[in-house]
């Protein structure tokens, strides 16, 4: 605990420096040096929340020194320190960092931390907040011409929206990303996956719209987006699903899903959506009978 | 091309007739008592049929070789089967014609021992073979399914890797842009530094000039004050 007590001493010294006033040299810079040493010691002592407070103090002092960049990185450090003890505080710091980076015009950095915030929110299950933050991050990435990061954020937003039941918006997101990726040699192989995801959303949406033929139109549209989508395994799967859906045959629907799953395992997201679709199909069938 | 194929088909039909006749004659010669007239007769006839079949096969071979490239492979494969068949027939015929009818005594001995016909030709044997074949087909089907699954997984992985590559490429390009920017900045600062150095030099020179002027003024003043006042 030698590190911790030494750090506390340093912090006290720095505070005294800040409270008093010196004629020679800059008291802020001296205090800063002390605080930085203190934070390093606190980290060594694994006193994370104290380290976080220390970084916050550094941020305050840096603000007085008018060095925006240092302020932002101090907030990020604080957030990393708080992450180990209190998640809300850590996010608060991250938000401050994002604000600082945005003010500075470093939008790429701001987007990076926004995405981190969004992923945290998603981890806690707050999907609305996550959608909000991630779409902001996506827009910023897009503005900074970091296309692949922007795409990643948009895909995440789209799949979260689908989870929330906003299928039309989700499809829009998937389609935008697909259109962007199809001309790129490295990304064109992923387009099929995006279109599959989008089409599953379309199946769910067709129940909400009460329009069984909707999916067929969507599939045709997707064949135009990516010519290699037609005739692929995914395309056949979707067509079979659509057939089962139009006929209202729940057993056939299940069989088709099983067949596809035997070839390549469906992930949690797809399983969830297909389950939703199946329930809706069952409900439709009950209505008819 | 269709012409040569037609000739081939004709030969093939003739060969099939000859081969079936030969095998029928062989079978009947087996059932007839050893050393009998009928048996030798049958055997001789079978022998002539086999020779005929052989010459037919040779002609088919010629036809097949003159056929077009893609038809050739299938025809040659069929021919190979026929040749193997014929070789079997020949062997059978020779063993039946051997003095004392070795095949006949062998069959009798086998029957005495309680063995049936050749196991492969009995119903049970064929059934067994069929089962084996089905099992093999099933196993290969399963293997194909597995490899398709692996392929699907690999495809997914590959597309993911390509995505990552693209992201990294973007990062690298970004880093390069930043680097160029930094390079520009450094160049600019170098120019600033050079101009600063030049200005410092001119300042120094001016200062030197001023000092010289001042010294000269001092001397002038001293000269006028003392030398003149002496007079």
Image: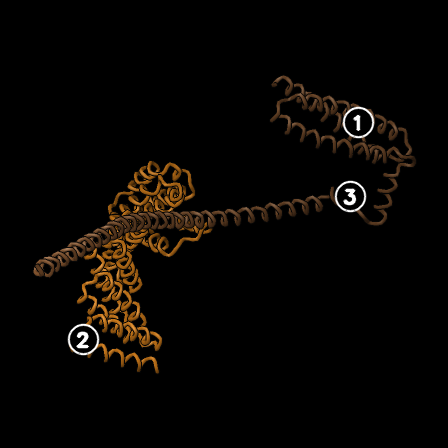
Dot in front, 3 or 1: 1
Chain letter of disc 3 in the image? B
Q: Is residue A35 visible?
A: yes
Q: Which chain is orange?
A: A
> How far, Cα to Cα, is label 3 from label 1?
23 Å
The picture places residue B79, in percent across and down from the top left corner, at 70, 29
Residue under label 1: B50
**A107 to A37, vertically: above or below:** above
Q: Nearer the viewer, mark 2 or mark 3?
A: 2
| Residue located farthest toward the front when viewing the structure as drawn | B231
> Residue B138: x percent and y percent?
58, 47
Q: Residues within 10 Å of mark 1 (few under 14, many from 20)?
A: many
* Tag nearer the camera, 1 or 2: 2
Crowd around label 2: few <14 · some 14–19 · many ≥20 (10 Å): some
Q: Quadrant of residue B210?
A: bottom left
Q: In the rendered image of this protein, which colour is used for chain B?
A: brown
Residue for badge 2:
A18
Is the residue under label 1 in contact with that under label 3 (CB below 8 Å)? Answer: no
Please give left or right for residue B67 compared with residue B208 in the image: right
Which residue occupies the extreme top position in the image? Answer: B3
Residue A165 appears in the figure:
no
Viewer-proximal residue, B105 or B56? B56
Q: Residue at x 33, y 74 (%)?
A: A43
- Which residue bears the numbered disc 3? B118
> Which of A110 and A153 lies nearest the eye of the viewer?
A110
Q: Give how far apart the Cα atoms at labels 2 and 3 are.
A: 107 Å
Where's residue A2, x and y in %?
35, 82
* B172 with respect to A9 (left or right): right
């Amino acid at each position: 605990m030698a590190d911790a007590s030494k750090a506390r001493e340093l912090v006290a010294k720095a505070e005294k420096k800040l409270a008093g006033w010196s004629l020679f040299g800059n008291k802020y810079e001296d205090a800063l040096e002390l605080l930085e040493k203190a934070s390093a010691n606190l980290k060594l002592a694994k006193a994370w929340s104290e380290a976080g407070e220390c970084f916050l103090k550094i941020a305050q002092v840096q603000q007085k020194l008018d060095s925006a960049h240092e302020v932002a990185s101090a907030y990020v450090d604080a957030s990393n320190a708080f992450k180990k003890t209190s998640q809300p505080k850590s996010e608060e710091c991250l938000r401050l960092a994002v604000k600082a980076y945005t003010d500075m015009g470093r939008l790429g950095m701001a987007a990076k931390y926004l995405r981190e915030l969004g992923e945290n929110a998603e981890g806690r299950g707050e999907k609305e907040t996550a959608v909000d933050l991630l779409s902001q991050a996506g827009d910023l990435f897009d503005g900074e011409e970091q296309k692949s990061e922007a795409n990643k954020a948009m895909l995440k937003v789209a799949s979260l929206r689908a989870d929330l039941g906003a299928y039309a918006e989700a499809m829009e997101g998937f389609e935008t990303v697909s259109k962007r990726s199809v001309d790129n040699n490295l990304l064109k192989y992923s387009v099929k996956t995006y279109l599959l995801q989008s089409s599953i959303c379309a199946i769910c949406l067709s129940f909400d719209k009460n329009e069984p033929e909707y999916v067929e139109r969507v599939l045709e549209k997707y064949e135009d987006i990516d010519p290699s989508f037609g005739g692929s395994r995914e395309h056949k799967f979707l067509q079979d699903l659509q057939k089962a859906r139009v006929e209202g045959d729940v057993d056939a629907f299940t069989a088709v899903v099983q067949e596809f799953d035997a070839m390549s395992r469906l992930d949690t997201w797809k399983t969830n959506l297909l389950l939703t679709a199946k329930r809706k199909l069952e409900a439709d069938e009950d209505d008819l009978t | 091309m269709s012409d040569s194929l037609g000739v081939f088909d004709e030969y093939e039909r003739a060969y099939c007739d000859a081969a079936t006749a030969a095998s029928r004659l062989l079978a009947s010669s087996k059932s007839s008592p050893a050393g009998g007239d009928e048996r030798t007769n049958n055997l001789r006839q079978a022998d002539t049929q086999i020779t005929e079949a052989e010459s037919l096969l040779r002609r088919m071979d010629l036809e097949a070789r003159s056929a077009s490239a893609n038809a050739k492979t299938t025809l040659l494969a069929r021919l190979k089967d026929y040749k193997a068949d014929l070789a079997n027939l020949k062997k059978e015929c020779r063993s039946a014609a051997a003095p004392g009818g070795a095949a006949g005594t062998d069959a009798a001995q086998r029957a005495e021992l309680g063995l049936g016909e050749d196991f492969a030709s009995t119903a049970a044997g064929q059934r067994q073979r069929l089962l084996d074949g089905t099992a093999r087909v099933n196993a290969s089907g399963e293997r194909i399914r597995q490899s398709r699954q692996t392929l699907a997984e690999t495809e997914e992985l590959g597309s993911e890797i390509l995505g990552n590559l693209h992201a990294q490429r973007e990062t690298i390009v970004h880093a390069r842009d930043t680097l160029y920017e930094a390079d520009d900045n450094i160049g600019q600062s170098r120019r600033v530094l050079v101009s600063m150095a030049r200005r410092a030099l001119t300042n120094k020179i001016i200062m030197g000039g001023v000092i010289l002027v001042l010294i000269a003024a001092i001397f002038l003043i001293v000269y006028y004050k003392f030398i003149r006042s002496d007079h």
